[in-house]
Amino acid sequence: MIPTRIFQRFSHDSRVFVAGHTGLVGSAIVRALQRYGYGNLVLRTRAELNLLDQAAVQQFFAQEGIQYVFLVAAKVGGILANARQQADFLYENLMISANVIKAAADNGVEKLLYTGSSCIYPKLSPQPIPEEALLSGPLEPTNEGYALAKIAGLKLCEKYSQQYGKRFVSVMPTNMYGPNDNFHPEHSHVIPGMMRRFHEAKLSGAPSVTVWGTGSPRREFLYVDDFAEASLMVMEHYDEPVTLNVGTGEDVTIRHLAEQMRSVVGYQGEIRFDASKPDGTPRKVLNVDRVLSLGWAPSVPLAEGLARAYAWALQHGRLDLPAAQGAEAR
């Protein structure tokens, strides 16, 4: 039986474009839409539609009659890639956001949801981080390029809403993980990167796995299908031009995450922490009071989410090869 609580005032044949549908977030949104019976999805790979090409994006929107847009396409990567490729991350994410948002505005899209990242907030934000912390201080230098591009995208949505009355809204998720994550050994985020290291240590019989830092920093993690549910709810119920944090509102230490990962993977060795490596920000967790007030709440606990993600990665061979996957697909 098809659930009916999402998109109740939209017809099931609405033309919905999910920009970035092959990546971690986009594929979760597609799964959620299909679960609720939305079959008229418009999907394009990067080979079929290069979102960096403004003319091609304009032509696509003019021809396809798109009504709703989930803009989750982005160039993404881990801390190393963000730090080394600042110009690329800034340019490509600026162009993707600007091209899609402008084309949506020009071609009568009824509503657009833009997905940013919690890295938009200042390095020394109050904890938990409220939406009002945006632009209140300097950004983390290692991912400034990506963060600036994401800030520009959410501000472009805000200004189109204010100047032209467009229903363009933005959400800022915390660290996400799950099916279709990036398990590249150098370009992945903390959970898939750590999962790969524990998995490889299990297979090789290594006596220990080394984790950077002291293990004391605290981070927040959200299973991506929970975020997809929040995104659909926001598309239906939220029209404010102010961005909306989406997360669990709860954080764990990196040491706790490593211990959970060891259990999920089934690794029997020791966890070592290299205190000579940087810890980064001591704590990073979002204030999610606003999104919770709309009726959404996360449903997948960390241990369950890690188990699901590991099972998916094994089933799809994402931990078998040294370069399982590049940057998230657009």
Image (cartoon, grey):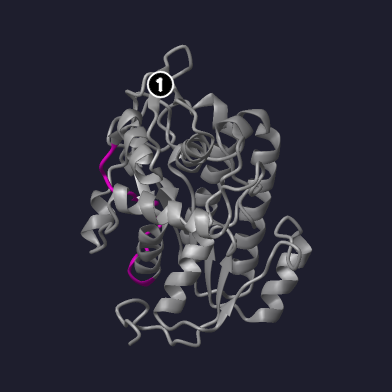
* Above-or-below relation of 72 to 151: below
> In the rendered view, would you say 200 is above or below 49?
above
Instruction: Where is residue 235? Give x, y as percent.
Output: 40, 68
Q: Mark 1 points at which residue?
A: 272
**Identity of the residue furthest to the front in this view:** 205
- From the top left corner, tell me how far across and down residue 166 is, in percent: 49, 66
Name which quarter of the figure residue 297 lies in.
bottom left
Q: Residue at x 70, y 39 (%)?
A: 88
- Residue 240 is a magenta residue: yes
x and y, in percent, of residue 51 in the image: 70, 59
Count of residue discs = 1
Q: What stretch is highlighted in magenta?
A: 236-251
Is 4 included in the stretch rendered in magenta? no
**Mark 1 neighbour density, 10 Å: few (under 14) some (14–19) many (20 or more):** some
Which residue: 75% across, 72% down?
59
Viewport quadrant of the N terminus: bottom left
Q: Main secondary structure of the magenta part?
A: loop
Whether residue 163 is visible to the viewer of this picture, yes or no, is: no
